[in-house]
Image: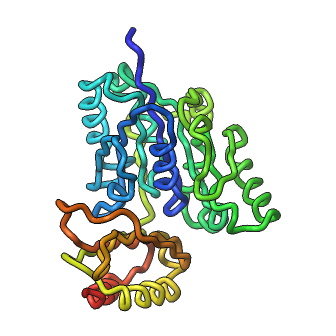
Amino acid sequence: MSEKIPVTVLTGYLGAGKTTLLNRILTEPHGKKFAVIVNEFGEIGIDNDLVVDADEEVFEMNNGCICCTVRGDLIRIIEGLMKRKGKFDAIIVETTGLADPAPVAQTFFVDQDVQDMTRLDAVVTVVDAKWLKDRLKDAPEAKNQIAFADVLILNKTDLVSEAELKDVEAQIRAINPYAKLHRTQRASVSIADVMDRNAFDLDRILDIEPDFLEEGHHHHHDEEMQSVSFRIQGDVDPEKFMPWVQDLTQREGPNILRCKGILAFKNEPKRFVFQGVHMILDGDLQRDWKPEETRESKIVFIGRKLDRKAIEDGFMATAA
């Protein structure tokens, strides 16, 4: 029997730090080559651009959530990858923040071709230490992601006190007492703690979901959850954009679960990348725009009760 390619499923609720962890994995000196499959909940793909400029090939799936509608795409991508076997050592699948990991993991057991060629190494779940308690109240996906984890990355520990951290850990352990848990800031964890763990335990999953191996396991998202995204062909004025986005996130923060964007600032050769969770925004200038790239600015907001028209008008008014 030929050796199966290990697959790591990277999950975690919106804004927990999945892409940060993915970038850490890709940039750490490990001598391995990964194929990366990125799925995101949004009309305009941004996560693909947020993945570091590594040698890895990145496959983007934007037309639906991986756990619901695009599993066929996942199977096709994996089958395509297998035809180039030997050119990479492992596959990483980054799911949307809203994905239920069960049907994603199920793919590696119910599709015979995929099962013959790959093995699910581990479900790695990133958890936001600051916001988990809120998410456990209003987002069943967050609980499922923890329940299915083989490895838990408790991220953003610098944003909470030690007492709050212990409280969050107790809530996590009540859901999943088995997974290896690592406390991190900015998803800083050794690659050896995340990859090649051989940690996925089918028996444990069958205890949680006895029908795991049966087809027809469907996931339904929060109907209120929406994603709005906009693009400006060209530059935006930072003097207009920064006050606008700060005001928007301060006013609408409770409804904004996630926001992110890649912007071309006027007279700036580097791309500005920002990410936010609720009212907390983080942004920085990153690499230069490449000569062959079209300078454009794009943003995505994911949340509830988002006023699409107001956000669009506000963003368009920041054009340089």
At horizontal 68% and vertical 68% (from top left) the residue drawn is 159
Query: Which residue is nearer to you in this view: 69 or 278?
Result: 278
Query: Which residue is nearer to you in this view: 233 or 271?
Result: 271
Where residue 29 appears, as percent x and y from the top left, is 50, 38
- Residue 79 horizontal side relative to residue 287, left or right: left
At horizontal 29% and vertical 26% (from top left) the residue drawn is 82
Query: Which residue is nearer to you in this view: 57 or 134?
Result: 57
Q: Report whether residue 160 is seen.
A: yes
Image quarter where the N terminus lies is top left
Q: Is residue 205 above or below residue 3?
A: below
At horizontal 67% and vertical 39% (from top left) the residue drawn is 179
Figure quadrant of residue 77: top left
- Residue 176 horizontal side relative to residue 276, left or right: right
Q: Is residue 152 above or below residue 298?
A: above
Figure quadrant of residue 85: top left
Where residue 51 appears, as percent x and y from the top left, is 39, 53
